[in-house]
Amino acid sequence: MPGLPVVFHPEAVEESRTARLWYAERNQSAADSFLAELDHGIESISEAPERWPLFIHDTRRYLFLRFPFQIVYRVANDRIEVVAIAHGRRRPWYWRLR
């Protein structure tokens, strides 16, 4: 059964690109692993968005297993809105006004 459609905030797209490039400059395998984990997270969220706990401002978050990142998202109007691909240890909650 297909999951809910996923829409990315433009800044979340840029955050994922920036993180991938940072890893790629150091190790292409790490960059590939980062993208694979991001893809897995998006797929998991799409299939069962309420599986992850409520966070702040009516969002939820999916924590990466191997990287210090999280996918911050909300369920709205039968779709998933990815608010941020946020580093877990830098500038906490910078995305909250999105």
Image (cartoon, grey):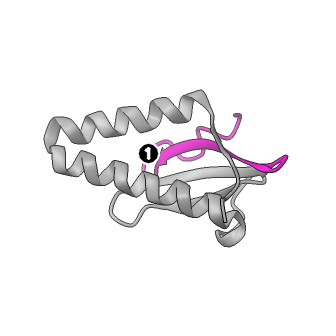
Q: Is residue 69 visible?
A: no
Provide the residue span drawn in magenta: 76-98
Residue that lies at the very extreme toward the left in this rendered image:
27
Q: Position of residue 41 (x, y in %)?
A: 50, 59
Q: Residues within 10 Å of mark 1 (few under 14, many from 20)?
A: few
Left/right placement of residue 11 relative to residue 74 reads left
Query: Residue under circle 1?
Result: 90
Q: Position of residue 11 (x, y in %)?
A: 55, 29
Q: Three-letter amino acid code at disc 1?
A: Arg
The reply to whether the magenta stretch includes residue 67 is no
The reply to whether the magenta stretch includes residue 90 is yes
Q: Position of residue 55 (x, y in %)?
A: 69, 60
Q: Secondary structure at mark 1?
A: loop
Quadrant for the N terminus, please.
Answer: bottom right
State the residue at coordinates (43%, 52%): 38
Q: Is residue 92 visible?
A: yes
Q: Position of residue 83 (x, y in %)?
A: 63, 41
- The vertical placement of 10 against 32, above or below, is above
Quadrant for the C terminus, please.
Answer: top right
